[in-house]
Every structure is written in structure tokens, then in C-alpha cells.
Image: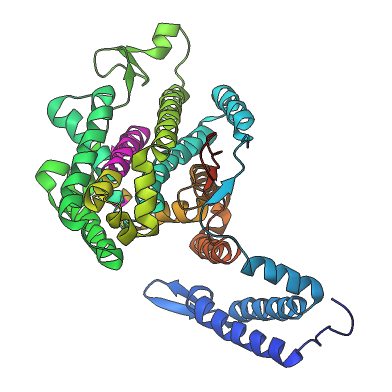
């Protein structure tokens, strides 16, 4: 940009932006930072609120002035021209993931040897949310169905293990496939009558379904234990148990190996099985997205009218996405139950559905790699921010806003490798 074409910096506009930012921060931070609950009363903290609002106003002033400079205009134009849709790669493109994935598999295999129990439990939780994110990514990211009650299928898997053990004597390995089938059946039962709905109406119905499941678990005291919850058995492996004492007639692993008891053995086993299941789900999802059913999901997401005009049964396409997504949540629920050793309804609130949806949106709608990264970011970050426990949700909201401005399609967009036309076929 030449000096003659340079626009002068509009100080008035910057000041107006600063005042508006100050008013918005006062509205947002006032109830959070300026009011501190004290028993049944509250104390006002005007000084702390003034510092927070002042910092926002100063930052907005400098940002507004910078965005009017030559470099700021270039940065702003880069945001405005952010690509959307599916990114098509050259036909002969070779993804770097063929080198990265084996490296991470090797790291994951040797990780439990060096990790302590706390780090291992955090990674297990991250892998559980990877499963949940992959399942919801099929429903929301690929098929374009806004599901706000996805946590219900998560609860079905967790309570399936607890109830199956309590009433039928079923163990971890038996319930693991059964939970996927039960959650898929629940998704099919819910989906068949409601998937003719669209958009907001579908979101409201699925939200209601999630709340119905939670209320049943809370109020059916004689069957589910109500708010008190239910214990979940520790996993076993061919009669080998991972507790201090053998509860199910097996042999504790520390006695079998002739070593001292270590509670980390249980989490190492859960980590190993969970890691294998995540790899299998990643492979199945990767294959499904390249099969006709995966293409049908994406066609439905982009334009349902055109999809129906092509002869696709939109109800069956939606139902397949809903069923497969629900089955993945059922698997995650079993691992969550055996990881915690206890389940109760407070673990399956709407906040969990919102968190899983945030993983899908932040990672990238339909992007597998993005969902894996976002799942670990949104589960590990709260553990790193325990010293900021009062502001974790606020920081989470700021992250969402920044991501929607910076990367509206998520961290990683969907990419497809182009196809060369066959010889003798006109382009």
C-alpha cells in the first residue's frame, strides 16, 4: 500500500470501539468478577472489576489502532477470506499422517511405562472424549444433525455396565459389545420418529431425550440407585483381576507376578484396551467416510433437497448416522464407568453434551484429526488450569469465541484427495 493510498487512523472509531468493549466487559464480567457470594449474602468487588474492564478497554484500543495499520488490514483480510467447505488436495498428494500416526502409536505404547497414575488417568479421560467426539462427529460433522442429547447414549453405556453387573453378573468384556448395541438400538428408537425434523426442532427433541434419560436414572431409585449411583466392577482379563483383593474369584495381578500391589495396574489395563478401541473406531470411521454411506452423510449435510432429488432415502441416511454415533458413545460409557468405578446421574448432564459438541466444532466439522486434537485440548487444559478454577468456564467461552473468529471451520478442515480422470474419459 503506497503512502498516497494510506488511510489515516480513525481515532474516533477506535475510541467508540473501546467504550463499547468496556460496556460489554462490564456486562459479562460484572456478575462473575464483581460479585462474590458469601453464604446467603454477597460482597461487591468494584476494584477487581475495574481492573478487568480497564484491561479490556486498553487492549481493545490498541487492537483497534493496530487493525487500521497496513499490517493489521492484511491480517483482517486473511480472516475474511477464510476458506470454507471441503478442501480438495491434488490427486497425487501424500499425507504426512503416514509418518505421524506410526510415531504417535509408538509413543502411546511406551507412555504407560513412564507415566504416573495421575497423568495416566488424565490421558484415559482424554481418550474417552476422543471416542465421544468421533461418535458425535458422525452425527453433527458428517450428517449435519444437531444433537444436543448425545450424553444420553453415553449414560446408557455406563449404566449398562453397572446394571448388567449388579443384576445379571455381566462383566466388562461382555458388556462392552452389548453396550454398543444397546446404545445403537436407543439411537434407532429415538431417531426413527424424530429424524424427519430439521434444524432447531431436531435439536430440541434430542435435548429432551437426554434430559429424559437423566431424570429416569435419577428418579428410578429401586433400579438405578437414583442420585446415590451404583458401583461398577473393575475389569478383568482371563480371570486376572487388578484390585488389591480378588472379588470375582480370580487372581490379583500382583499376586500372579509376585510383586507389590500397585493401583496403576488397573489404569494401565484400561488405557491399553481403550487405546486399541480408539484405533479401531478411527479406522472404521476413516473407511466409512470413503464409502457410499459416508458420501451420503456429507451430501445430506450440504443440501438435503438435492440429496433427496438424487434418490437417497434421507431418513435412512440420517438413521444410520444416528445409530453409529450412538454406538460409539455406548463404548465410551463403558470405559468411563470402569475407569471411575462408580456412576451416578450427575456425570451425564447437558454440560457434557455441550462439551462434546464443542470438541466437534472446535476440531472441525467432519475432521477426524481435528476432533482428536480438540478432545485432548478440552480435557487436559482444565487439569492444567486447576489454579484458575473460578475462571475455567470463562476461559472456555473465550476460547470458543476466538476459534469462531479465527477458524470458523474448526482447527482442521475436511480434506479430500482429488481423483485423476480415467484414460479415455473426457474431463
Question: In the picture provided, is 414 more to the left or to the right than 325?
Answer: right
Question: In the picture provided, is 129 more to the left or to the right than 334?
Answer: right
Q: Is residue 343 visible?
A: no
How many numbered tags mark residues here? 0
Give percent across and percent down for residue 232: 27, 33
Q: Residue, x 59% and y 60% (percent of image)?
A: 83
Q: Quadrant of residue 63?
A: bottom right
Relative vertical location of residue 243 with respect to residue 224 in this rendering, above or below? above
Q: Is residue 341 visible?
A: yes
Q: Residue, x 30% and y 45% (percent of image)?
A: 321
Relative vertical location of residue 335 with respect to residue 413 in this rendering, above or below? above
The kind of secondary structure the magenta stretch mainly shows is helix
Relative vertical location of residue 305 with respect to residue 265 in this rendering, above or below? below
Relative vertical location of residue 399 with respect to residue 241 in this rendering, above or below? below
Magenta highlight on residue 345 = yes
Quadrant where the C terminus is found in the figure: top right
In the foreground, 380 or 66: 66
* Colour theme: rainbow
Q: Residue, x 17% and y 44% (percent of image)?
A: 225
Q: Which residues are magenta?
A: 323-346
Give percent across and percent down for residue 136: 37, 48
Give percent across and percent down for residue 230: 23, 39
Question: In the picture provided, is 215 more to the left or to the right than 302?
Answer: left
Direction right: furthest residue: 3
In the foreground, 196 or 278: 196
Magenta highlight on residue 173 = no
Quadrant where the N terminus is found in the figure: bottom right
Give percent across and percent down for residue 304: 32, 59
Amino acid at each position: 500500500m503506497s503512502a498516497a493510498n494510506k488511510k489515516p487512523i480513525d481515532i474516533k472509531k477506535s475510541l467508540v470501539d473501546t467504550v463499547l468493549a468496556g460496556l460489554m466487559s462490564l456486562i459479562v464480567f460484572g456478575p462473575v468478577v464483581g460479585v462474590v457470594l458469601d453464604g446467603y449474602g454477597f460482597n461487591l468487588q468494584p476494584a477487581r472489576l475495574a481492573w478487568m474492564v480497564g484491561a479490556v478497554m486498553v487492549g481493545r484500543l490498541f487492537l483497534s489502532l493496530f487493525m487500521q495499520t497496513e499490517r493489521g488490514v492484511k491480517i483482517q483480510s486473511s480472516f475474511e477470506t477464510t476458506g470454507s467447505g471441503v478442501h480438495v488436495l491434488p490427486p497425487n498428494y501424500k499425507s504426512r499422517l503416514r509418518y505421524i500416526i506410526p510415531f504417535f502409536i509408538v509413543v502411546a505404547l511406551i507412555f504407560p511405562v513412564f507415566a504416573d497414575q495421575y497423568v495416566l488417568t488424565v490421558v484415559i479421560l482424554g481418550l474417552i472424549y476422543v471416542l465421544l467426539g468421533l461418535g458425535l462427529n458422525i452425527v453433527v460433522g458428517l450428517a449435519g444433525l444437531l444433537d444436543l442429547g448425545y450424553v444420553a447414549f453415553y449414560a446408557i453405556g455406563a449404566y449398562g455396565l453397572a446394571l448388567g453387573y449388579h443384576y445379571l453378573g455381566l462383566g466388562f468384556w461382555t458388556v462392552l459389545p452389548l453396550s454398543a448395541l444397546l446404545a445403537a438400538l436407543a439411537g434407532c428408537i429415538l431417531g426413527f420418529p424424530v429424524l424427519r425434523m430439521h434444524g432447531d426442532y431436531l435439536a430440541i427433541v434430542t435435548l429432551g431425550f437426554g434430559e429424559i434419560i437423566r431424570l429416569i436414572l435419577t428418579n428410578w431409585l429401586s433400579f438405578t440407585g437414583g442420585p446415590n449411583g451404583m458401583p461398577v466392577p473393575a475389569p478383568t482379563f482371563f480371570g486376572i483381576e487388578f484390585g488389591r483383593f480378588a472379588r470375582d474369584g480370580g487372581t490379583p495381578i500382583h499376586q500372579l507376578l509376585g510383586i507389590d500391589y500397585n493401583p496403576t495396574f488397573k489404569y494401565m489395563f484400561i488405557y491399553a484396551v481403550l487405546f486399541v478401541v480408539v484405533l479401531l473406531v478411527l479406522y472404521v470411521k476413516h473407511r466409512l467416510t470413503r464409502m457410499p454411506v459416508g458420501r451420503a452423510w456429507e451430501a445430506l449435510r450440504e443440501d438435503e433437497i438435492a440429496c433427496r432429488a438424487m434418490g437417497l432415502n434421507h431418513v435412512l441416511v440420517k438413521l444410520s448416522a444416528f445409530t453409529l454415533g450412538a454406538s460409539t458413545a455406548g463404548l465410551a460409557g463403558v470405559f468411563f464407568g470402569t475407569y471411575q468405578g462408580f456412576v451416578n446421574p450427575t456425570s451425564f448432564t447437558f454440560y457434557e453434551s455441550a462439551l462434546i459438541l464443542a470438541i466437534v466444532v472446535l476440531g472441525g466439522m467432519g475432521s477426524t484429526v481435528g476432533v482428536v486434537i480438540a478432545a485432548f485440548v478440552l480435557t487436559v487444559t482444565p487439569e492444567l488450569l486447576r489454579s484458575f478454577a473460578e475462571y475455567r468456564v470463562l476461559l472456555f467461552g473465550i476460547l470458543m469465541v476466538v476459534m469462531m473468529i479465527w477458524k470458523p471451520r474448526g482447527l482442521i478442515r475436511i480434506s479430500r484427495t482429488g481423483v485423476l480422470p480415467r484414460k479415455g474419459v473426457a474431463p
